[in-house]
Amino acid sequence: MVLCFCGNQCVVKCSWTPRNPGRRFYCCSQMVLQSGTDCGFFEWYDPPMCPRSIQIIPGLLHSRNVLQESRNVLESANRRLKIYLVATWVLFLVFMMM
């Protein structure tokens, strides 16, 4: 358990800056509440990353985000096509009953 300057238990957050992608750090719990009264405590939880990781991780994160966006577009298209399929079957059955 790590205590900050104001005596509160610190929380672990994750940095997503280009220099420290995915690196965790301790900070004052008041900072998390965004009350503006944090004590300014900051300490790294994880050891420093190697330079190669710092170069590779942002590209991997970008690729993952592009893939997630593509998946979301395809899922919405799939839902729309399922609705069209059900609608055509309903229309077909109505037409056959006439």
Image (cartoon, rainbow, N blue to C red):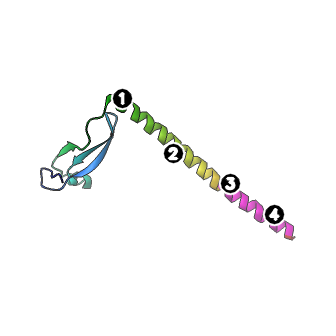
Q: Which residues are magenta?
A: 80-96
Within 10 Å of disc 2 (Cα), the crowding (few <14, some 14-19, many 20+) is: few
Report the residue marked by disc 3.
81
Task: Label the magenta part by its dominant secondary structure.
Answer: helix
Q: Amino acid at mark 3?
A: Leu
Instruction: Judge left or right: residue 74 versus residue 36.
Output: right
Report the residue marked by disc 4.
92
User: Is residue 88 covered in magenta?
Assistant: yes
Real-space CA distance between mark 3 and mark 1, rounded to the nearest whole angstrom = 44 Å
Real-space CA distance between mark 4 and mark 2, rounded to the nearest whole angstrom = 36 Å
Report the residue marked by disc 1.
52
Within 10 Å of disc 1 (Cα), the crowding (few <14, some 14-19, many 20+) is: few
Q: Nearer the viewer, residue 51 or 94?
A: 51
Q: Pick whichever of labels 1 and 4 is earlier in the sequence.
A: 1
Q: Pick whichever of labels 4 and 2 is earlier in the sequence.
A: 2
Query: Which is closer to the viewer, label 4 or label 2?
Result: 2
Real-space CA distance between mark 4 and mark 3, rounded to the nearest whole angstrom = 16 Å
Q: Pick whichever of labels 2 and 3 is earlier in the sequence.
A: 2
Report the residue marked by disc 2.
68
